[in-house]
Image (spheres, rainbow, N blue to C red):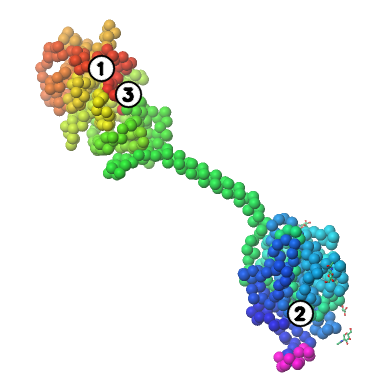
Amino acid sequence: MAAKLHTSILVYSMCPILLIGPNLVAFCTAQVQSFVYSGFKGADITLDGVAVVRSDGLLELTRIADVRGYAFHRDPLRFRRSPNGTVQSFSVSFVFGVQSDIDVSVDGMTFFIAPGNKFSNTFSGAYLGLFNDSTNGSPNNHIFAVELDTFGNGEFKDMDSNHVGIDVNSLFSVQAQAAGFYDDMTGTFTNLTLNSGEPMQLWVEYDAQTTQVISTLARLGATKPRRPLFTTTTNLSDVLENPSYVGFSGSTGSLSTIYCVLGWSFGMDGPAPAINITNLPKLLRGHRKARSKVLEIVLPIATAMFIAVVGIVIVLLMRRRLRYAELREDWEVEFGPHRFSYKDLYHATEGFKDHHLLGAGGFGKVYKGVLPKSKMEVAVKKVSHESRQGMKEFITEVVSIGRLRHRYLVQLLGYCRRKDELILVYEYMPNGSLDKYLHCEEDKPTLDWTQRFGIIKGIACGLLYLHEKWEKIVIHRDIKASNVLLDGEMNGRLGDFGLARLYDHGTDLQTTHVVGTMGYLAPELLRSGKASPLTDVFAFGTFLLEVACGQRPIKQDSKDKQIMLVDWVLEHWNNGTLMQTMDTRLQGDFDKDEASMLLKLGLLCLHPLPTARPSMKQVMEYLDGEAALPELTPTHFNNLNMVSMMERGGFRPSILSYPDLTASIGTFSGLSGGR
Ligand SMILES: *[C@@H]1O[C@H](CO)[C@@H](O)[C@H](O)[C@H]1NC(C)=O
Ligand SMILES: *[C@@H]1O[C@H](CO)[C@@H](O)[C@H](O)[C@H]1NC(C)=O
Ligand SMILES: *[C@@H]1O[C@H](CO)[C@@H](O)[C@H](O)[C@H]1NC(C)=O
Ligand SMILES: *[C@@H]1O[C@H](CO)[C@@H](O)[C@H](O)[C@H]1NC(C)=O
């Protein structure tokens, strides 16, 4: 009867004499007892079988298959006030949970009132740990039980596998009802699944007056429904011994089901105290059924999907890394602002798609692109290279060239470097290259004289800037019509300067590596391989004649023989028919003086002797009319036939049989084409 005050309350309301002395206990005829446990830590209970109280206070009646577990209030309770009296009213309430690994859990648990606290001869399984084959149904059992049955047992005429039953001395329930509750508002019945793993609360009240047993079930936390689950009439005065033990039994058959009790309260001849549900231990494993589904079905799928997703992400990241991989070295740090990310260039050209291709030449392919962030139109030139040697000097030069800004130069915006690729980013020139207009490709309109003269002056101006106006001398090395690009206003702008240097650096010194385009190469360049501003002037002279005459630097003569344009113009000058060399598409609509000056200037620039050529500064003065062209006669050039000069330079034009006649010589061929 002694119980710890914090978990149980013993009220001796009708027995004041007890307090006077032990000898008077016999006279004490009435005891009203109640207790309440929210969790069973330190509770006055005794355990039997496999039952345990977990450290958090949860009472587990069963643990493994085919065993029984019991928990009792340690001291028996007096249900009758006098030995021959009737059984008093009482109330019991408890919170329980059934965790089952499978849908079908076997057997069940009970709250029972029994004369003894030993159940050694009982059976587990169907007998719920209370009876055995021979004792089931015997009035000598003196056992009252409320069963929470999760196994429909035909032997005992169980109604289903999910019911609450009132048992008296037998597992043939006096009455049973499917687990559930009636809604207070609507009165509708809602099923509850006992082995859902969800905690529930059961109230069982015995009314001595009416001998009714009232059972009410609800989800934990819900208020006790007003309409009970069911009411059974059974006179417990014919059943219970005095005193009797109160407790729980749990039994599992062959499969593992854990019957748990979280809290318990009891009131003799009065209501059972309320269980403080906030202090209850938790059913740690929660809804085992749901959990097992998660574990068995969802989790493996989720894991597999997760692994697959991670794998795909890694592959994509790797591909992305490879796709956008760049070559970056320490010395490039200072060129940061001029360095483009490959990713941006890749996106700008939609992955270097063919429909972005502007042109292709010996140096590489040129694509049109739109930079993702600035939406700026650019020309992206991919130059393949293998030599890493000299790359630093080259990039240094590219970057310094990038600092060059001139109205008649195509602005180099920056670069990017990959393993075998150098990528140069230029301003985009909407009207393409000049050669397309001169040689009537792609149905381009014919340029009139003013336009041609303007373009020539522009290029001369740009070249002068490269040669003299900048902090160091920059030799273009590849002046030709196809390297002159036309901007939106049809201004000629010089592109691709300095690129030829890439092939100067790092190449084998044993091989000839003259870079340029046939017809534009000065004789001394062929001999020595050494470029100078005057070799640029030579190429400019060819360019001049090309624009004025609308002819390629190496043309076919009437006998289908290849001749140099310069020799052809010279011949006409000799014959006094210089004006006949002018482009017939101009239809004579040009300034004769300007044309004559231009042709003669072209010839002067093409002088086989470098020292006889004017500098770009002089060229500019002649073009601007600030200085008069020196008096020249064709005899100046006599005996200086270009072909013979070239042949002396070790080069035979007869081997030039490339279709566009602009093939270059040296280690790199086909350097013509787009910028
Ligand atoms: C109780 O009943 C027994 C017999 O059943 C009888 O001997 C006893 O005197 C009764 N006691 C009281 C207090 O009525
Ligand atoms: C059943 O229980 C009773 C009482 O404990 C015992 O005497 C009897 O031997 C048991 N019967 C079986 C079949 O175990
Ligand atoms: C409740 O469960 C019983 C037995 O499983 C079933 O017959 C009944 O239809 C269910 N009622 C509701 C409302 O789900
Ligand atoms: C219950 O049983 C006891 C003893 O058998 C009897 O005295 C009492 O009148 C019964 N109560 C009711 C309500 O039938």
Residue 320 in view in this figure:
yes
User: In the displayed structure, would residue 142 be above or below residue 164?
Assistant: below
Residue 418 at what x, y percent from top left? 36, 36
In-image side of 255 versus 373 (left or right): right
User: In the displayed structure, would residue 349 be above or below residue 224?
Assistant: above
The rendered magenta stretch, by its main secondary structure, is classed as helix
Q: Is residue 292 magenta-colored? A: no
Label 2 – label 3 distance at C-alpha: 109 Å
Amino acid at dot 2: Leu
In the image, the residue with mark 1 has its CB under 8 Å from the nearest atom of ligand 3 = no
**Residue found 81% across the figure and 72% down from its top:** 144
Q: Can you tell which quarter of the image residue 485 is in?
A: top left
- Residue for badge 1: 553
- Residue for badge 2: 77
- Highlighted range, magenta: 19-28
Q: Earlier in the sequence, mark 1 or mark 3?
A: 1
Amino acid at dot 3: Gly
> Along the line of sight, which residue is nearer the eye, 36 or 154?
154
Residue neighbourhood size for the residue with mark 2, other residues' Cα within 10 Å, grouped as few (<14), some (14–19), many (≥20): many
Label 1 – label 2 distance at C-alpha: 124 Å
Q: Is disc 3 placed on a helix, strand or loop?
A: loop
In-image side of 300 versus 646 (left or right): right
- Residue for badge 3: 673
Mark toward the viewer: 2 or 3? 2
> Along the line of sight, which residue is nearer the eye, 587 or 629?
629
